[in-house]
Image: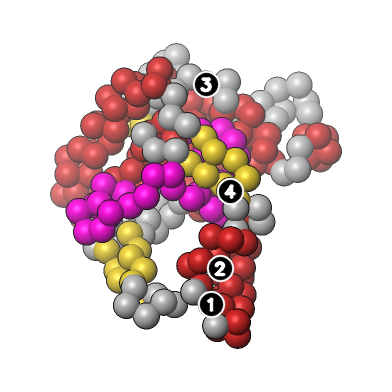
Amino acid sequence: MITGVLSAKRGYFNYYAELETAGKCFEWVMDHLALDEINVYLDQTKVTDVESKYLSLYDYLSEEVSKVPPGANGVIFTPWLHGNRCPFEDSNAGGMFFNIRIENGKRDMIRAVLEGICYHLRWLLECSEKKVKTSDPIRFVGGGALSPVTCQMLADITGRTIETVDNTQEVGAIGTALVVAAGIKGEDVFELSRRLVKANRAYVPNSENKDVYERNYTVFKKLYKSNAAYYKQLNS
C-alpha cells in the first residue's frame, strides 16, 4: 500500500511506501543481541568504555558489521517485527532469521538485520517506481544515514547512488522551516531547498557485491509468501 498526500507545492504530491519497523529493528538488535553477548564483553569491556571511543553503541555495531562480508554469510532477516504495510499489508507478519548454520555468529545476524531493512527498502523503491519516477541519486536521511556502513549497503542493494545531508536526524524540522521560509519570501520551496540543502557525501554502488545481494534479495522477497499462512496461524 502506497499513500499519497498533498505536497507543500500546489499540484504536487508526496508518496509514502512504509516499512513499519526499520530503526526499531536495529534497536531490538542492540537490546537483545549486542548488549547481551556480541563481544562487547568478549574482552570484558564495559559498555561505557565502548561508548567513550564511539559516539554511540550504534557506531560500535556498525564497525562490527563491517567485518562481515556482504550477504551476511547466507543469513537473511525479515524486518517485520510489527507487521508490515507495503508492498503487502499484514499485521500478522513477523521477523525471522533465515538460513542460520553452525558457522554463523552474531555479527552475521546483526549484518543480516541491516541488510534485511535495505532489501525491504529496495522492494518499496521498486513498488514506487510503478507509480512515479524516482531520482538517482536518492537522499537517505534519519539515524541510519549516520552509518557509512549502512549507506554503502543501501547503495549496493538498491543499485542507486545514495546521498546524505547534514543534520540528518532533524530533516523534518528543517523541511518545515523551509516551507515557512519559502512562503514568507514568496519563493518556490523546491528551488529554495535545492539551494540550501546540499549533499555532504555520496555512496556509489559497488559492482563486486551485486551478485550476492541479488541472490539474497530474490530469496528475501519469497519469504513472506512462503510463510504468510504460518504467520496468520501463529499471530491472528
The mark lying in front, picked from 4 and 2, is: 2
Q: Amino acid at mark 1?
A: Glu
**Residue at numbered disc 4:** 199
Q: Is residue 143 visible?
A: no
For marks 4 and 1, give the CA distance. Answer: 21 Å
Q: Residue type at mark 3?
A: Val
Left or right of 82 in this view: 221: left
CB atoms of marks 2 and 1 within 8 Å: yes
Q: Mark 3 against mark 4, which lies toward the viewer?
A: 4
Q: Nearer the viewer, mark 3 or mark 2?
A: 2
Q: Amino acid at mark 4?
A: Ala
Whole-Å distance between the Cαs marked 2 and 1? 7 Å
- Reading the image, the residue beneath label 2 is 192
Q: Mark 1 = which residue?
A: 187
Left or right: residue 120 compared with residue 146 = left
Q: Earlier in the sequence, mark 4 or mark 2?
A: 2
Whichever of labels 3 and 4 marks the residue nearer the N terminus, that label is 3
Mark 4 vs mark 2, CA separation in Å: 14 Å
Residue 186 among magenta residues: no
The magenta region covers 125-154
